[in-house]
């Protein structure tokens, strides 16, 4: 089955700096890669996603890149703000009634 | 206007008891899920239902039995609770027109289960 590795497990940045979280996946058939943000005491919430026919996607301060050859994808957050502090999960799936496999999570702390 | 709701939010019980967690979504989605998040924040799928039909069962002990009375509800019943069942359980739903896992999953607020 699919295996998703995520690094780093914790990340501290100064407010205004950029943060990068990296994930690798094992199944070359995976074609959908969502990123979720989980705030304390809440359920995960989708912040951005990318499909295998796209190499990069951007939404304001958040961007995701996908390298299908290397089987890795990354989340980039620019101009970080204290409210970006949360646990971030990457995930991968090939759809078609196959499960979504989540990474192990990255706890991001933005220091004011 | 909550999209995915779960009850209860907290559940504290003794080992050996039987308990249920309820989930409802008002998004009109076809697929619903149960996830378990342990103390290290690992998020693992347990079950997935599509239009009331079980699609994914991730080698969960048979003490866990999901039930979907209609496509807006997916309840989780747990028999003979064990200490290792302590975790946060999340319900989620997605539209999935093109197959499971291909669309945004909307998560509920979670149920924190503590087994004493």
Image (cartoon, coloured by chain):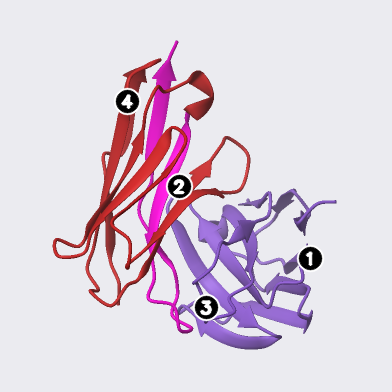
Chain colours: A red, B purple
* Residue at the (55%, 86%) spot, across then down: B55
| Left/right of residue B98 with respect to residue B50 in the rendered view | left
Alpha-carbon span between mark 4 and mark 2 = 24 Å
Alpha-carbon span between mark 1 and mark 4 = 38 Å
The picture places residue A33, in percent across and down from the top left corner, at: 38, 61
- Contact between labelled residues 4 and 1, with CB atoms less than 8 Å apart: no
Is-magenta flag for residue B92? no
* Residue at the (73%, 73%) spot, across then down: B74
Secondary structure state at the residue bearing disc 1: strand
Residue B13 shows in this picture: yes
Alpha-carbon span between mark 2 and mark 1 = 23 Å
Chain ID of residue with mark 4: A
Secondary structure state at the residue bearing disc 4: loop
Q: Badge 2 is on which residue?
A: B41
Depth check: give the residue in front, B36 or B92: B92
In the image, residue A79 above or below residue A4:
above
Q: Residues within 10 Å of mark 4 (few under 14, many from 20)?
A: some
Secondary structure state at the residue bearing disc 3: loop
Alpha-carbon span between mark 2 and mark 3 = 23 Å
Q: Badge 1 is on which residue?
A: B24
Depth check: give the residue in front, A76 or A100: A76
Question: Which residues, given as a range, are shown in magenta?
Answer: A85-112
Q: Badge 3 is on which residue?
A: B100
Q: Badge 4 is on which residue?
A: A18
């Amino acid at each position: 089955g699919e295996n998703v590795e995520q690094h780093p497990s914790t990340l501290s940045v100064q407010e205004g700096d950029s943060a990068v979280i990296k994930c690798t996946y094992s199944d070359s058939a995976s074609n959908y890669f969502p990123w979720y943000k989980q705030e304390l005491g809440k359920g995960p919430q989708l912040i951005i996603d990318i499909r295998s026919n796209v190499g990069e996607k951007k939404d304001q301060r958040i961007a995701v890149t996908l390298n299908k050859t290397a089987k890795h994808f990354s989340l980039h957050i620019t101009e970080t703000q204290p409210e970006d502090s949360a646990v971030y999960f990457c995930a991968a799936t090939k759809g078609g009634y196959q499960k979504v496999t989540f990474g192990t999570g990255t706890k991001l702390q933005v220091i004011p | 206007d909550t999209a995915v709701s779960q009850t209860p939010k907290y559940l504290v019980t003794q080992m050996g008891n039987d308990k249920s967690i309820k989930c409802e979504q008002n998004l009109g989605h076809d697929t619903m899920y149960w996830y378990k998040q342990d103390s290290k924040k690992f998020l693992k799928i347990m079950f997935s239902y599509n239009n009331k039909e079980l699609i994914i069962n991730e080698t969960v002990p048979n003490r866990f039995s999901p039930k979907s009375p209609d496509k807006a509800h997916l309840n989780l019943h747990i028999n003979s609770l064990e200490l290792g069942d302590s975790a946060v359980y999340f319900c989620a739903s997605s539209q999935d027109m093109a197959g499971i896992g291909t669309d945004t999953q909307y998560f509920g607020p979670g149920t924190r289960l503590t087994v004493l």
